[in-house]
Image (spheres, coloured by chain):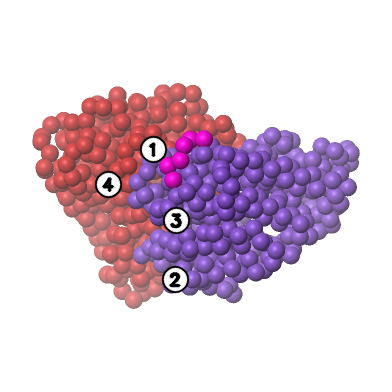
Chain colours: A purple, B red
Amino acid sequence: MLRLTPGGVRRHHQGSGKALANVVNHEKQREGREDALDVLLTLVGGDLKRVNEIIVERMHSPIALIPQLAGHIIAAGGKRLRPLLTLASARLCGYEGERHAQLAACVEFIHTATLLHDDVVDESLLRRGRDSANALWGNKASVLVGDFLFSRSFELMVEDGVLKVLGILSHASRVIAEGEVAQLITANDMATTEAQYLEVIRGKTAQLFAAACRIGAVVAERPEAEEEALDTYGMTLGIAFQLVDDYLDYSARQQDLGKTVGDDFMDGKITLPVILAYQRGTDDERAFWRRCMEAQDMAEPEKDLAKAIELMTRYGTLAETVERARHYGERARSALDIFADGPAKAALAGIVDFCIERAR
Amino acid sequence: MLRLTPGGVRRHHQGSGKALANVVNHEKQREGREDALDVLLTLVGGDLKRVNEIIVERMHSPIALIPQLAGHIIAAGGKRLRPLLTLASARLCGYEGERHAQLAACVEFIHTATLLHDDVVDESLLRRGRDSANALWGNKASVLVGDFLFSRSFELMVEDGVLKVLGILSHASRVIAEGEVAQLITANDMATTEAQYLEVIRGKTAQLFAAACRIGAVVAERPEAEEEALDTYGMTLGIAFQLVDDYLDYSARQQDLGKTVGDDFMDGKITLPVILAYQRGTDDERAFWRRCMEAQDMAEPEKDLAKAIELMTRYGTLAETVERARHYGERARSALDIFADGPAKAALAGIVDFCIERAR
């Protein structure tokens, strides 16, 4: 049954791009020390305003539920990190036209579509208090509005008229879907290897970061080497970003960010801190992990979660996850070496810090 | 929880295109009197074989669940009507190259993705014995494999390299999503008008028929007038097709086709036979329709379904639905007038009969 009116949830009216542009500022203020994001916003703030206008204009549909639901997730959402990467990469490549804003909006539409599809659940549960679009409007509406945004994104790329961009984002979308399916398969499976985990996060997260950055070089019609460098920057940054996310899920820091701790644990999602703790555990501890993550047999979930965090802390796997993120962050930074120094390069290097520093 | 192995269901092994090609033959034999489909298959059988090969090759992924799940729905599925329309339209336009097979595969991938997404349910029910991919593998896998096929379809269009095709199919995909959302909104709402119903079926069904046909003219690089004619043919054929589908859902004929009767009724889906019966009903009858379709308050669903069919028969709304289909079928046939007579034109005209005659 369709729930058309989300109860008790702040509604975002999408008459202008203003509400959306404000999200970034609110987020920034809440964080306080996100200087790197500030720098980036100063650099491409005007472009981002245009991206937000395009997002609002182009998520319109005569079917009112579509902008309503899409607006909920787009406005409530994050920092516009992916479109910001496209804008900053284009700037780094000396691009001075206007195509990059529309393509950055495409990237955000694809990201939003994957969020909506990721919200789909097999049991019709409200997911632990998250006001996901799914919880408000149901599985089916989430899927179909995701499809709308995905299709719209390709319509916008066709308007843009450059086949290479369509190639990059259709490929990225396909790899994202593969990564998400791989994640589904590895869920509840303690036999998941580090290599498999890495393939999952490359697909589900890093591929879109890579595509977002590569497009910056493509609009600027820069040589293949610069495309490749920005792809590598985005890919390694995306891996670092997801590693920090997977660390944060078990960190008290997560609560400061207004999110619940232990969602991955409760979902049986196998992430690096868990894989490493399982590898290093005693037989008893391994049995504990299998009971929680595979059988999901938890009479007292909070107690099990506390024990899981205690084990990960004891074996240093949370710190090690952040350490790996730092390593990928370094690789991201190095990928920028072929570009001349300047404010865009500094801003992109700063984004590496921003992604890693979330862990502090 | 993911169910990886579908229990008690015939598995299709996708080692070659053979299994897929056979589906069409089995279907044909089962139907017996589908002469029009025979004619079409004779005309473009070689091309269809190539389409099936491309489908099998390109639904491949290192993530084994993807071809497994996609293969289940693609092989179990229908008559390849949409790709056949692309092949026949290309033939009608005198096309002699090889691009049409790959683009026909794109059309089938998009169709399959929409089927998978249409299978997503808000309650985790096995839907009345249908062995949908969803019932076998769960909501999430259906969504993600749909996303894979959708993305793959756009990758194949990028390989093809003609922006116009990407424009046609991204637009069609967006309109399909809008139609599906519109259908979600009109479900359980007896205030749904004929005009709203028509918009829903134009979007969810007819738009892809129109795009499939238009692509035939585009690959052959024919003038705009021929593109438009084929678009109109596909659009009106698609409307006729869906009208017959919506009739069949209440027809004993449906059982001969191996499907259950009354699924739309049980889902509260508002289709033309119901809209017309509600318009013509007494106050008591209208209360009956509201109880069943809106409140879905049915202590004895089978008895309510029998009464619904009795009302639709009494008011002649089932016959009238088929009559409307016939009318759209005539429009489809007329749209072919601008083309020279020949086997391709005869085959496409025959497909109109095939779609309508399913009602007999």
- The residue identified by callout 2 is A16
Dot 1: element:
helix
> Could you tell me how far apart the alpha carbons at marks 4 and 2 are, in whole angstroms?
35 Å
Q: State which mark lies toward you, 3 or 1.
A: 3
Q: Residues within 10 Å of mark 4 (few under 14, many from 20)?
A: many
Which segment is the magenta one?
Answer: A220-225
Residue B158 is marked as 1
Q: Is residue A345 left or right of residue B45?
A: right
Dot 4: element:
helix
Kind of residue sitting beneath label 1: Val
Q: Residue B3 is drawn in which quadrant?
A: top right
Residue A301 is marked as none
- The residue identified by callout 3 is A101
Q: State which mark lies toward you, 4 or 2.
A: 2
Kind of residue sitting beneath label 3: Ala
- The residue identified by callout 4 is B210
Q: Is residue A185 left or right of residue B24?
A: right
In contact (CB < 8 Å): disc 4 and disc 3: no
Q: State which mark lies toward you, 3 or 2.
A: 3
- Inspect the magenta stretch and tell me whether residue B337 lies in it: no
